[in-house]
Image (spheres, helix red, strand yellow):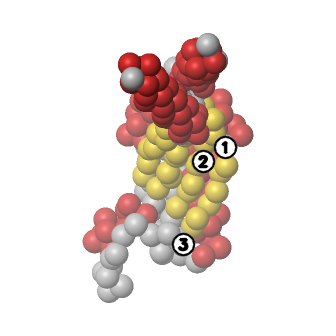
């Protein structure tokens, strides 16, 4: 009877160890596929694609925050407000995106050289300004649409460090297998 109780306890312990190893493996897989995304937006004057001092300050801080990160990819997207023709707005938003990409590259964010740089023109407004608004009120209302959004995906440190966490999970699983086969 005592042997049966010990065998039952061993089976329960074995099942618990196997479930723990499985949970650790699954969490490692989830961690391996998760990238972090850092984002920043900078804004432009009407019809302009040159960076203001405020935009440069924002981009400098962003570039500095990425200095220790391992970058997996980047996207730079330029936008324009609804004023002007579609063609002119697309060209302007492309110039804005390229200006930001070049600036970040000069600040040491080398992955921006191979970033996906796109021009959305006026196709994705972030404002809902009334059609009848004119002059400086329209310019102020539409200012959030005159922007460039930068999104940089960074690799979690676990992957960059040779996947120590995943390797530790494997070692733990091997130990459990050894104990189960013993």
Residue 14 on image: x %, y %: 49, 26
User: Label 3 near label 2: C-beta < 8 Å?
Assistant: no
Residue 178 in the image: x percent, y percent?
A: 62, 15
SS label for mark 1: loop
In the rendered view of the protein, which quadrant contains the N terminus? top left
Name the residue carrying label 1.
Answer: 115
Dot 2 or dot 1: first in sequence order is 2
Q: Residue furthest right?
A: 114
Can you see residue 125? yes
Q: Are marks 2 and 1 in contact (CB under 8 Å)?
A: yes
Circle 3 residue: 123
The quarter holding residue 125 reads bottom left
Using the numbered discs, state the Cα–Cα distance from disc 3 to disc 1 in whole angstroms: 21 Å
Q: What's the residue at 65%, 51% (across, down)?
A: 117
Q: Is residue 65 visible?
A: no
Location of residue 91 in the rendering, given as x and y in whole percent from the top left corner: 65, 63
Residue beneath the point at 44% across and 44% down: 40
């Amino acid at each position: 009877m005592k042997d049966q109780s010990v065998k039952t306890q061993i089976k329960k312990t074995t099942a618990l160890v196997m479930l723990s190893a499985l949970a650790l493996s699954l969490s490692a897989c989830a961690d391996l596929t998760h990238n972090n995304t850092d984002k920043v937006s900078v804004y432009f004057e009407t019809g302009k694609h040159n960076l203001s001092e405020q935009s440069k300050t924002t981009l400098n801080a962003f570039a500095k925050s990425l200095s220790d990160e391992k970058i997996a990819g980047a996207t730079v997207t330029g936008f324009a407000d609804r004023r002007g023709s579609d063609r002119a707005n697309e060209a302007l938003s492309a110039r804005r995106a390229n200006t930001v990409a070049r600036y970040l590259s000069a600040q040491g964010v080398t992955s921006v050289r191979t970033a996906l740089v796109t021009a959305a023109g006026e196709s994705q407004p972030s404002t809902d300004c009334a059609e009848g608004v004119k002059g400086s009120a329209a310019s102020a209302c539409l200012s959030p649409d005159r922007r460039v959004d930068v999104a940089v995906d960074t690799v979690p440190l676990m992957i960059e460090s040779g996947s120590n966490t995943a390797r530790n999970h494997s070692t733990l699983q091997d130990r459990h297998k050894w104990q189960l086969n013993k």
